[in-house]
Image (cartoon, rainbow, N blue to C red):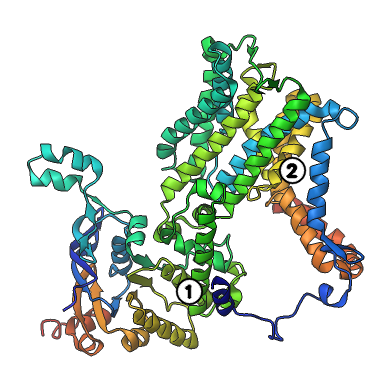
């Protein structure tokens, strides 16, 4: 068996008294399309934000690609020999910040597209290559030949991803001038440009028509075939059931079921979560 | 190899009938983008650049604009500060209302070191730049935890604090007579002791700063900065270290301001706290806005306009000068929010496309113009006021 690409162990997040994510244990298998579903307010987006590092977990741990996303900062390393108690050491541990996780290979898209409106379509994707390139202020200022070569590579790669989602024609347009369906594709292309191992799609199908949804599921399969693990949060059940190889169901912050589409559809807890419980059916 | 790949990847729209060339270029044998003399064709852009360069080279000679050398020098110095401000405000979207403070730190540091300790002025300039950069770096991390209006308040406060320092710490800043007798910059035996010589020094610096800033904007770093302006959450999600980039560009703009301040110190006969106060910061912001915040070359235009106005025309207003700046800022923000320079540039571009239809368009505009202007003016007045007057 291959090791899972992402594991969460006992992951919790509380906003004051409200527990958004409650002791969730997930395993996301490598090279599969996994869907996370659940009714509104189930904590799906919060879970995404925990995985991508927008939020810090209240407790628990995330393991990505066999490595924990917790690390010891330099000051913790400096004082570590002086500390005996394990508790105190754990207090000093930090969770890797969002931009570091992007560099590690976790990419995401947002529910509200979040494109860079002050750039063209191509530049949006070129920005996605940020973590895969080096040059800084100084190299840029004096236009080192190395930096110019790097820029060419970035442009070519960006064009590759742009053609992959079928937006090659619109390369020089402003990103915000595209219709919503294409904006969502662009957001996915920008996430792909970070060359991730795992891509998290937050409601990619919302606001798309039937044709665009078919194109979207096609694209997701192609992404999977590239060897990138796909995790999506989605409300559109036909889309999810058609494409997801593994489905995880959340309800009010807890994982209530997981399995293939057929297994999940028969699950009593899932039916109860979506349709409301009946008095006699709840126990069975 | 790369070229071949590029051909493959970039879809060509050569044979696509749906993509048509603009009408102006298709029908007319002459193009407005190029000047054609016989077989030679030169782009108008290059001609404009060449004319500007010639102007700037000839300007300091006494038979041309020699008597305005002081104005031109302060224009160059202001341009350097504003390029930094453009990078910070226009590209990264972070407001700084205390930029004159870094200008002042550069000026005093460089001036005091070279006057009192006989440090080589170039070295003093370098030390001042490093010190200002370090100062900006230290305050940058806490200050960029703030956003929007709060950031503006904090930078404003830093500006005010530094002005107080310049005024009160008179052991070093000598505020009574101003710090005077600062040595001029010199290369070998060649001292920049006349305005004519300093003109070329300042504008060479200015050109250098403009070029490297433009390179920065058009690179990976520049894209990261614009991404932060566009959407911070998205920028973070694709791996841009938002805080670090904000601090870095803040340091860069402070270093630019400091270099400009050093040039200023070695140029003026004496320096007092007045050119570094709050009004100076406001002036800088007005210049940046007029030039167009997201436009590097607009900095010259913005600096030029406001410097010429403030050195000559607005001085006559004395107490009312700040009102004039405020008024200019308001008017520009309402009618040309991207800046006067950018507005001019885009209208030139519009002219390139539409010039062949110009008579027809002008005819239509002439009919529409009064009502359009009325609508625009009405929008400035609260609706309640003008609705009452109508029956």
Q: In which quarter of the image is residue A46?
A: bottom left
Chain holding disc 2: B
Give me the residue at 42% from left, 68% from top.
A191
Give the side of residue A224 with respect to residue B307, left or right. left
Residue corresponding to mark 2: B301
In percent of width and height, residue A284 lies at 10, 85
Residue name at image x 38 percent, y 71 percent:
A202
Does B221 sit above or below residue B180?
below
Residue A161 circle label = 1
State left or right for residue B54 relative to residue A129. Answer: right
Q: Position of residue B151 (x, y in %)?
A: 49, 40
Q: Residue drawn 54% across and 33% down? A: B156
Task: Indicate the quadrant containing the C terminus of chain B: top left, top right, bottom left or bottom right.
Answer: bottom right
- Can residue A237 be seen in the rendering of this structure? yes
The image quadrant of residue A174 is bottom right
Local crowd at mark 2 within 10 Å, few (<14), some, or many (≥20)?
many
On the rendered structure, is B151 left or right of A196?
Answer: right
Point out residue A241 in the picture as x, y percentages from the top left corner: 31, 87
SS at badge 2:
helix
Between B321 and A87, the one nearer to me in the picture: A87
Q: Is residue B323 visible in this depiction of the protein?
A: no
Identity of the residue drawn at 23% across and 84% down: A271
Seen in the picture, residue B278 relative to A154 is either above or below; the reply is above
* Place of residue B315 in the rendered image (x, y in percent of width and height, measured from the top left): 78, 25
**Dot 1 alpha-carbon crowd within 10 angstroms: few under 14, some 14 to 19, many 20 or more:** many
- State which quadrant residue A199 falls in: bottom left
Q: Residue furthest left?
A: A84
Give the number of marks. Answer: 2
């Amino acid at each position: 068996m291959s090791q899972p690409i992402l594991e969460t162990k006992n992951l919790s997040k509380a906003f004051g008294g409200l527990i958004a994510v409650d002791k969730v244990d997930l395993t996301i298998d490598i090279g599969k399309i996994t869907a996370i579903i659940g009714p509104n307010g189930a904590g799906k987006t919060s879970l995404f934000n925990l995985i991508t590092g927008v939020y810090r977990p209240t407790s628990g741990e995330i393991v990505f690609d066999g490595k924990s996303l917790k690390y010891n900062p330099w000051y913790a390393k400096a004082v570590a020999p002086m500390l005996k108690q394990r508790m105190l050491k754990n207090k000093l541990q930090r969770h890797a910040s969002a931009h570091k996780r992007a560099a590690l290979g976790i990419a995401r898209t947002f529910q509200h597209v979040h494109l860079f409106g002050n750039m063209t379509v191509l530049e949006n994707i070129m920005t996605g290559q940020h973590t895969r390139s080096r040059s800084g202020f100084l190299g840029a200022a004096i236009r080192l030949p190395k930096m110019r070569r790097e820029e060419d590579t970035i442009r070519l790669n960006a064009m590759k991803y742009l053609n992959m989602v079928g937006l090659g024609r619109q390369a020089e347009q402003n990103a915000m001038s595209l219709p919503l369906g294409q904006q969502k594709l662009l957001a996915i292309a920008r996430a792909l440009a970070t060359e991730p191992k795992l891509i998290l799609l937050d409601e990619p199908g919302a606001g798309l028509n039937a044709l665009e949804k078919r194109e979207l599921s096609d694209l997701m399969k192609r992404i999977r075939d590239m060897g990138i693990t796909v995790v999506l949060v989605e409300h559109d059940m036909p889309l999810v059931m058609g494409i997801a190889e593994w489905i995880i169901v959340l309800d009010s912050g807890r994982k209530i079921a997981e399995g293939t589409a057929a297994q999940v559809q028969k699950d009593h807890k899932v039916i109860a979560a979506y349709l409301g419980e009946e008095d006699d059916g709840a126990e069975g | 190899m790369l070229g071949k790949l590029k051909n493959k990847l970039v879809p060509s729209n050569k044979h696509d009938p749906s993509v048509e060339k603009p009408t102006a270029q298709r029908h007319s044998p002459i193009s407005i983008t190029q000047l054609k003399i016989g077989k030679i064709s030169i782009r108008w852009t290059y001609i404009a650049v060449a004319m500007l360069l010639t102007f700037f080279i000839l300007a300091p000679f006494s038979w041309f604009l020699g008597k305005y050398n002081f104005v031109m020098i302060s224009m160059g110095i202001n341009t350097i500060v504003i390029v930094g401000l453009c990078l910070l405000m226009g590209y990264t979207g972070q407001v700084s209302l205390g930029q004159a403070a870094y200008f002042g730190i550069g000026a005093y540091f460089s001036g005091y070191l070279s006057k009192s300790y006989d440090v080589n002025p170039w070295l003093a300039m370098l030390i001042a730049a490093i010190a200002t950069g370090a100062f900006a770096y230290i305050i940058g991390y806490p200050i960029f935890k703030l956003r929007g209006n709060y950031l503006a308040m904090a930078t404003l406060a830093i500006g005010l604090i530094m002005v107080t320092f310049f005024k009160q710490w008179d052991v070093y800043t000598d505020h009574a007579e101003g710090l005077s007798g600062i040595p001029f910059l010199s290369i070998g035996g060649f001292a920049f002791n006349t305005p004519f010589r300093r003109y070329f020094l300042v504008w060479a610096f200015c050109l250098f700063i403009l070029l490297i800033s433009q390179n920065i904007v058009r690179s990976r770093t520049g894209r990261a900065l614009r991404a932060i302006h566009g959407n911070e959450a998205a920028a973070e999600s694709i791996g841009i270290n938002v805080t670090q980039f904000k601090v870095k560009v803040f340091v860069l703009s402070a270093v630019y301001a400091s270099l400009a301040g050093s040039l200023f110190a070695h140029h003026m006969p004496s320096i007092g706290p007045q050119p570094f106060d709050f009004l100076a910061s406001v002036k800088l912001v007005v210049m940046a806005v007029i030039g167009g915040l997201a436009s590097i070359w607009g900095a010259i235009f913005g600096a030029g306009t406001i410097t010429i106005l403030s050195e000559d025309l607005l001085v006559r207003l004395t107490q009312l000068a700040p009102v004039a700046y405020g008024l200019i800022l308001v008017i520009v923000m309402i009618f040309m929010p991207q800046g006067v320079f950018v507005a001019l540039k885009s209208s030139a571009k519009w002219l390139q496309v539409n010039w062949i239809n110009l008579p027809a368009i002008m005819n239509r505009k002439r009919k529409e113009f009064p009502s359009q202007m009325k609508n625009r003016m009405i929008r400035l007045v609260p609706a309640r006021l003008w609705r009452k007057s109508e029956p």
